[in-house]
Image (cartoon, rainbow, N blue to C red):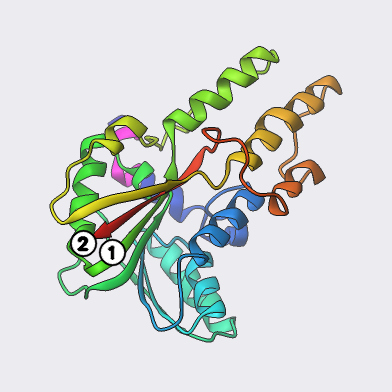
C-alpha cells in the first residue's frame, strides 16, 4: 500500500516521534509556540476542552497550565498518549488533563460534549478532503450549543503563496510532506455541515512564515547555508502581529455550533 494513503504507516510514523518532546509534532518549535498561543487565546476558565490528535500533549498541558479547564487529549498513536501522560504528571497545572487512545476517523462513543474541540495539524493526516469533511461533521456532534471547533491546520493556499515568493527569489519549492493532505481553502469555505457555521479564519502565522520561509531562507541561501528553525529572524514573529494576510501556512478555522 502507498504510505501516503496507509493509516498504519502514519500511525507508525507518529509513534516513532513520541520521545522527541517539543519536537514530537514538528521540528519547527517556534511555529508550534505560535499555534499554542493562538489556541490558548480562545480558551477561558471553566471550559471543558477536547484535543483530537493531541500527540504528546504539549498543547493540552499548556492549556491546563494557564487555565482552570478540563482538557481531554486523544490520539491514535499509543506511544504519543503514553508520552502525554508522563509529561502531564510532571507539570504544575491550574486545570486537569486526561489522555486516551482514540481515532478521529472512528470517534469513541463515550465522548461527552465540549465547549471547545480543537485539532492541531490532525486533519491534514487524513488522506483526502472527503475524509476531512467527514471528520468535521463528526466533531460538530461533540460541541455544546454555541460551542466552537478550532481547526488549527495547514493551508494548501498558504503554502502555494509562500512558494510563489520563494520562486521569485530562486528558492526551491516546499513540498507537502508525504503523510499530509493540506486543507483546500476553497473547499473549506464551501463545506456544508449541519448545525455548524464557519465564523472566521485566523491567519495567525502569516508573519512567521514570511520571515522564516522567505526572508530567512533567502538570507541563508546567500551564505550557501540551510535556514535554521531557531534563527533570531524567525523568533521575531513571536513579538510581531500577523501582518501578511494569506501567507500563513497554518491557520485556525473557527466553527461554531448553532
* Left or right: 238, with 220 as reference point: left
User: Count of labels shown?
Assistant: 2
Name the one closer to the observer, 107 or 8. Answer: 107
Q: Magenta stretch: residue 78 in it? A: no
Q: Residues within 10 Å of mark 2 (few under 14, many from 20)?
A: some
Q: Quadrant of residue 106?
A: bottom left
* Quarter containing the N terminus: top left
Farthest right residue in view: 223
| Residues in magenta, as a range | 3-9
Where residue 27 appears, as percent x and y from the top left, is 62, 47
Q: Earlier in the sequence, mark 2 or mark 1?
A: 1
Q: Can you tell which mark lies on residue 90?
A: none
Question: Which residue bears the numbered disc 1?
Answer: 102
Dominant secondary structure of the residues highlighted in magenta in the image:
helix
* Residue name at image x 13 percent, y 52 percent: 194
Where residue 208 appears, as percent x and y from the top left, is 65, 42
The reply to whether dot 2 and dot 1 touch (C-beta < 8 Å) is yes
* Quarter containing the C terminus: bottom left
* Residue name at image x 32 percent, y 62 percent: 148
Measured Cα–Cα span from mark 2 to mark 1: 7 Å
Q: Magenta stretch: residue 5 in it? A: yes
Question: Which residue bears the numbered disc 2?
Answer: 107
Where residue 140 appears, as percent x and y from the top left, is 21, 59
Amino acid at each position: 500500500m502507498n504510505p501516503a494513503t496507509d493509516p498504519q504507516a502514519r500511525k507508525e510514523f507518529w509513534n516513532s516521534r513520541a520521545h522527541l518532546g517539543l519536537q514530537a509534532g514538528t521540528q519547527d518549535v517556534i511555529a508550534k509556540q505560535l499555534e499554542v498561543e493562538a489556541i490558548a487565546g480562545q480558551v477561558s476558565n471553566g471550559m471543558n476542552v477536547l484535543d483530537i490528535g493531541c500527540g504528546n500533549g504539549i498543547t493540552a498541558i499548556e492549556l491546563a497550565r494557564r487555565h482552570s479547564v478540563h482538557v481531554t487529549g486523544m490520539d491514535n498513536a499509543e506511544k504519543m498518549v503514553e508520552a502525554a501522560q508522563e509529561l502531564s504528571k510532571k507539570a504544575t497545572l491550574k486545570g486537569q488533563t486526561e489522555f486516551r487512545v482514540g481515532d478521529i476517523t472512528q470517534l469513541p462513543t463515550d465522548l461527552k460534549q465540549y465547549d471547545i474541540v480543537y485539532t492541531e495539524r490532525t486533519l491534514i493526516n487524513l488522506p483526502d478532503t472527503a475524509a476531512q469533511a467527514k471528520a468535521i461533521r463528526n466533531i460538530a456532534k461533540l460541541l455544546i450549543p454555541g460551542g466552537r471547533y478550532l481547526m488549527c491546520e495547514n493551508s494548501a493556499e498558504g503554502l502555494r503563496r509562500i512558494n510563489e515568493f520563494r520562486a521569485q527569489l530562486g528558492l526551491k519549492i516546499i513540498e507537502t510532506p508525504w503523510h499530509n493532505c493540506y486543507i483546500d481553502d476553497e473547499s473549506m469555505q464551501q463545506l456544508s455541515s449541519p448545525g455548524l457555521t464557519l465564523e472566521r479564519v485566523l491567519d495567525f502565522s502569516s508573519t512567521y512564515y514570511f520571515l522564516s520561509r522567505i526572508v530567512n531562507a533567502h538570507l541563508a541561501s546567500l551564505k550557501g547555508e540551510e535556514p535554521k528553525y531557531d534563527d533570531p529572524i524567525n523568533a521575531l514573529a513571536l513579538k510581531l502581529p500577523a501582518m501578511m494576510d494569506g501567507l500563513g501556512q497554518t491557520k485556525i478555522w473557527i466553527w461554531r455550533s448553532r
